[in-house]
Image (spheres, coloured by chain):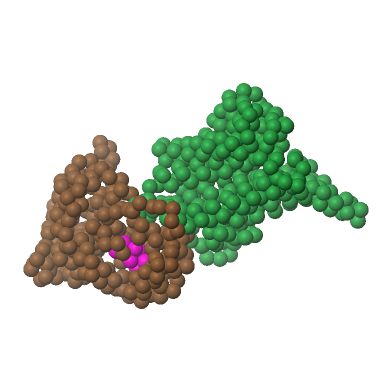
Chain colours: A green, B brown
Amino acid sequence: MDTVYTVISNFIALVPVTLAQSLILSFIVLGIMLPFRMLNFPDLTSEGAFPLGGCVCALSLAGGAPGWLAILAAMAAGFLAGSCTAFVHLRFRIHTLLAGILMMTMLYSINLRLMGKSNLSVYGTPTIFDGVPFAEPGFPVSKIVVAGLLGLAVYCLLNLYFRTERGTAMRAVGSNPDMAEAQGISIWAATIGGVGLAGAFSATSGALMVQSQGFADVNMGIGTLINGLAALMIGEAIVGKQTLRRQLAAPFVGAIVYYQLVSLCLAAGMPPTDLKLATGLFVLAMLALPTLKRARGPMPARETIRE
Amino acid sequence: MLEIRSARKVFYRGQPDEKIALNDLSLTLPTGNFAIVIGSNGAGKSSMLNAISGALMLDSGKILINGDDVTSMPVHKRASRVARVFQDPMKGTAASMTVAENMLLAELRGKKLGFSRGLNAKRLASYRERLSALNLGLENRLETRVELLSGGQRQSLSLIMATCDQPDLLLLDEHTAALDPRTADIVMQATVRAVEAFNLTTLMVTHNMQHAVDFGHSVVMLDAGRTRLEIIGAEKAEVTIPKLIGHFGLKTDRMLLAS
């Protein structure tokens, strides 16, 4: 009974910190969901765009830029990375996954070049989390408020955007590229714009992370993709993906729930080194579920993934 | 008005399996004309439609729509002029999007897209009205995702989408071939209604000889990548299924002789 009590009290003590972290990382989950679900373009760039955003943000902060400007710079860099992946796929007809792997590998060197060393401390520089009234700087509450408000704003904007004429056209490219093209929609513009936007969100996540933890590291991206994918799967299992509103909410809900689950596992004594195996198995199970269901029922209409 | 001037397309050029898909094909379709395209498999019907829609770039030759040279335009640039209904009901609609969203995409075909709200009340009302003309109950399923509709409903929707903004040219690619006879009939009636109402310049590819006899102002028969026969005017009015099939027979005889 005592151990259960310790586990729960440990877990509860960590809830605010984990919540702040999950809200920051929800942007990378969004950056994974957008190409995957809206454009049918499974994209791995985020694993490179996340540290890229962190590096650009750290450099900007070190150069004296205010926190919000550092985030904007990171977004621009992330957009560039994402649109490069989309370009490589469109121009050279390279498989989306391979294009993402190429970009993420190259970004590792680029990140090292940018910083000139493997990590950069920006501890003590003013951050975007400083502006919250009644909250002590550095305390989770200010991070929760800032990242939460930012997430809410992005959610609302995306919800509006995907209902506009342009946003509907972008979704059509993901749903049926041939049909979209026949309706006069440029596949190039929609794909480059959409994957670029996703890269910008992944970079935002990295930038917020750097401002939250006070340093950037070229290795900060390792494992973010699989964590983000797991979070997305959980989010979709909870809120569903039948409507646009639900699909857009899934990354945020998923990130919050997933990182609390991880925190619970760690509090229960799971070795942190086993975390990746557990996450991988979980994602595998979620992806395998439809196939297992299909074995006992009629074949559902299959949607092909862009190659 | 559609003009195809000595269009030529060769697949696998210089390889053992070289295939001449379009062999100096020329065709003129006056504005408001409804032409039926027939021909055996491999005659170049699909290549011709693909070349007109822009999915297939020609090796040489020209394609003009209403006098404008569209030969080097990609598919999405031609979309404001050309609408197409495919044989496969899945191809012409976005499956994971709703009926209303698909209608919106069709309405915006070839237009400049903006940041205003796509589905406003006015548009929804007009979609409801257009879909009710089909008598399939689609007007009450605007929020249904298209993947949940039957093949016939999807094809009817494709047709409404293709004809809603009166394209310069309507391409129908065996669009009733994958449907059961009753649904095929509904879709065909809807096609004729739309084509007549808007006086659309239309090319319809079909293997159904009855359709070739019953509909259209002219019949074009393709063979080995070129037009073999054009039946127009009074002759078209008198054409019968045996006569049409006779022309296929001629071709088979020649192929026998050649082999």
| Res A245 quadrant in image | bottom right
- A209 left or right of B69? right
Q: Quadrant of the N terminus of chain A?
A: bottom right
Residue A7 place in picture, x, y as percent = 85, 51
> Is B156 covered by the magenta stretch?
yes
- Nearer to me, A199 or B113: B113
- The answer to whether one can see residue B39 in this image is yes
Q: Residue at x 51, y 56 (%)?
A: A160
> From the viewer's perspective, is residue A4 above or below residue A88?
below
Magenta region's main secondary structure?
Answer: helix
Q: Residue furthest front?
A: A133
- Nearer to me, A172 or A77: A77
- B63 left or right of B99? left
Magenta stretch: give its range.
Answer: B154-163
Q: Residue at x 73, y 51 (%)?
A: A260
- Nearer to me, B199 or A69: A69
Q: Quadrant of the C terminus of chain A?
A: top left
> Is A303 covered by the magenta stretch?
no
Residue B69 place in picture, x, y as percent = 20, 46
- B162 left or right of B96? left
Residue A107 place in picture, x, y as percent = 56, 31
Residue A258 place in picture, x, y as percent = 69, 51
